[in-house]
Amino acid sequence: MTKPIAFLFPAFPNLHQTFVLWEVLALRERGVDIQIYSIKQPSTGTQQPEAEALRADVRYLPSNFSWALIRANLRVFARSPLRYLSVYPRLVRSWWEDRNAGQEWKTRKTSTGAPDRERTLREHLEGRFNRSPFMYLLKSMWLVPGAAWVAEDLRERGIDHIHAHWASYSTTVAMVVHWLLDIPFSFSAHAYDIYLVPRLLGSKVREADFSVTCARVNKNFLEALGGAGAEGRVTVNYHGVSLDRFKPIERKTEADEMPTIVTCGRLEPYKGHHVLLRACASLSRPVRCVLIGEGPQRGRLEDLARELGIAERVEFTGPLPQSELVAIYGRANLFVLASVVLEQSGKRDVIPNVLAEAMAMELPVVATDISGIAELIHDGESGRLVASNDPEALASVIEELLESPEECERLARGGAARVRDIFDRDKNIEDLTRMFHELD
């Protein structure tokens, strides 16, 4: 058993981020003593059964106006007033040093961008708020009192390492804890947390003991932000899927049965569900389309399905536990994820776990060629890749596969082999376990 390590999340548990749940459970099984902290309460009531069992273990940061937080801040300040007060100018300095972070990426990201018209007014406003560098700084500074509470709690409990999941606000808290206590920190970076507002990332990469990310494309981006000396400071560790839970099953479909296309992911513009619906509407044969997940685009997507005349063949299931996903995947013909990059914010998928889960079940997959998806899917070998935001191209590939069961079977076998090769959760978690055991 390792010495206790604090794992900090933006919100835990989160139904749409089940990969971190399985990581926590798997690391604990391997002797990593994880103490869970969360900045916020989860926003959804539905959770995986395993997540509910962990709720009692989570230590949630108190409100900035609570006496518990005020008392903790007074203690931290009393021990070292200059160190406490220096956090704010240090944050501003790091934020300013990274003012040009991601400029090269910003100049090229719009070539695959999704049109802003796919978003609601509320999403436009939220997007502007979330990608504003100034708001990012203000929100980061607002988290300093919470970081002081975490620092005091770790000191009292004798915990001397903090690992943050997601490179944005939770890692900011971890870095501030490091400044206040001189304890090491590390972090895991995933997707939107890297690209939405890259400010402070250079400092985080340089100051962390180590950082982990789920794709080579992320590693390259983070090390570029870190600048001189950052090469080799970021480790790629694919999330992986449970090959015990997601495994091939026999599929039986009638010749005259309507084909089923399934997709899974939060109902947001960057997932490209609007592209999938347009592609399904343009197919020469009717298909059933199952959208698993929930999100702010639900009403807009339902309206789009009606406009396209396919509403009676589109099913919105809402959020589902993984046990029910397996049953739906087992009845599907294709899994399609039409991810796009949003023009203004750059929000995108990197390597969505749902693709690997479908592939592990020998369900043929079609996805877009953005970010790190090509690290998982080799076009024509383990699935098919198409250009993003192109319903016609997507429809053409879907049509080809529905007309060729033999090709689907070949790609399905190749996809499952690819997952076994690089996305086996047990193999990847062993690498992560070694990293945490080496902290002792």
Image (cartoon, rainbow, N blue to C red):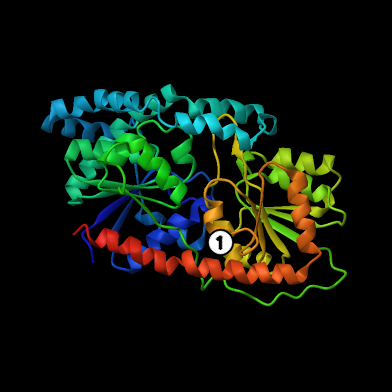
Residue 128: % across, % down = 54, 25
According to the image, label 1 marks what residue? 356
Q: Is residue 201 visible?
A: yes
Which quarter of the rendering shows the C terminus? bottom left
Local packing at callout 1 (Cα closer than 10 Å; few below 14, some 14-19, many 20+) is many
Point 33% across, 35% down: residue: 202
Type of residue at label 1? Ala
Point 23% across, 57% down: residue: 4
Point 54% across, 66% down: residue: 418
Tell which of 100 and 161 is nearer to you: 100
Residue 289: % across, % down = 76, 55
Tell which of 240 and 300 is nearer to you: 240
User: Where is 373 relative to 242, above or below?
Assistant: above
User: Where is 390 relative to 118, above or below?
Assistant: below
**Mark 1 secondary-structure assignment:** helix
Number of callouts: 1
Point 28% across, 59% down: residue: 435
Farthest bottom residue in view: 250
User: Is 438 left or right of 261, judged from the image as shown?
Assistant: left
User: Is 235 left or right of 128, judged from the image as shown?
Assistant: left
Residue 36: % across, % down = 34, 52
Q: Is residue 352 visible?
A: no
Residue 58: % across, % down = 36, 52
Which quarter of the rendering shows the N terminus? bottom left
User: Where is 440 relative to 281, above or below?
Assistant: below
Tell which of 294 and 30 is nearer to you: 30
